[in-house]
Image (tube, rainbow, N blue to C red):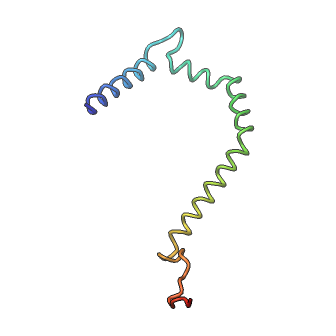
Amino acid sequence: MGLIRSVISMALLGLFIFIGFTVPIGKRTLFGHIGNIWSSEATQELVDGVKDESGPFVDRVKRGVKAGMSDDDEETEKPSGSDTPEKNSEPSEK
């Protein structure tokens, strides 16, 4: 069942891509229109505004990821059992 669904999905995706690149809608194809919209001045202003506003958030996320990665690296470098406190091998007196 999964193989048939995958084949049908790939065929539909291929058909969509084929139509998007070859069938004209007015003067351009679907992907031609999308490219034209993306390269317009208004869209570029919007993209620049989003980059400017999200810059501090992206920097904070990158620092968090780096900190998490360095924590993981430190944990893998420790010998096994080193993160557990040493236990006194002598029995405690009561």
The correct choice, above or below, for 22 with respect to 54 in the image is above
Query: Which residue is painted at 33% across and 24% down in the image?
Result: 11
Q: Is residue 25 above or below residue 6?
A: above
**Residue projecting furthest to the front:** 94
Residue 33, above or below 2:
above
Residue 8, horizontal then vertical, whole percent: 31, 25
Residue 28 image position (x, y, % from top left): 52, 14
Picture coordinates of residue 84 (x, y %)?
Answer: 53, 75
Q: Quadrant of residue 21?
A: top left
Identity of the residue drawn at 50% across and 69% down: 76
Quarter in which the C terminus is drawn: bottom right
Q: Is residue 63 left or right of residue 2?
A: right
- In the displayed orientation, state which residue is furthest to the top: 26
Position of the N terminus, as image quadrant, is: top left
Q: Nearer the viewer, residue 82 or 33?
A: 82
Q: Is residue 25 positioned above or below 50 on the image?
A: above
As drawn, is 55 to the left or to the right of 36? right
In the picture, measured across the screen, residue 81 lies left or right of residue 62, that is left
The one of 19 and 10 positioned closer to us in this rendering: 10
* The one of 65 and 26 positioned closer to us in this rendering: 65
Classify residue 62 as left or right of residue 25: right
Q: Residue at x 52, y 77 (%)?
A: 82
Q: Identify which residue is drawn at 73% across, 33% down.
A: 49
Label tally: 0
Image x and y of residue 67, in percent: 63, 60
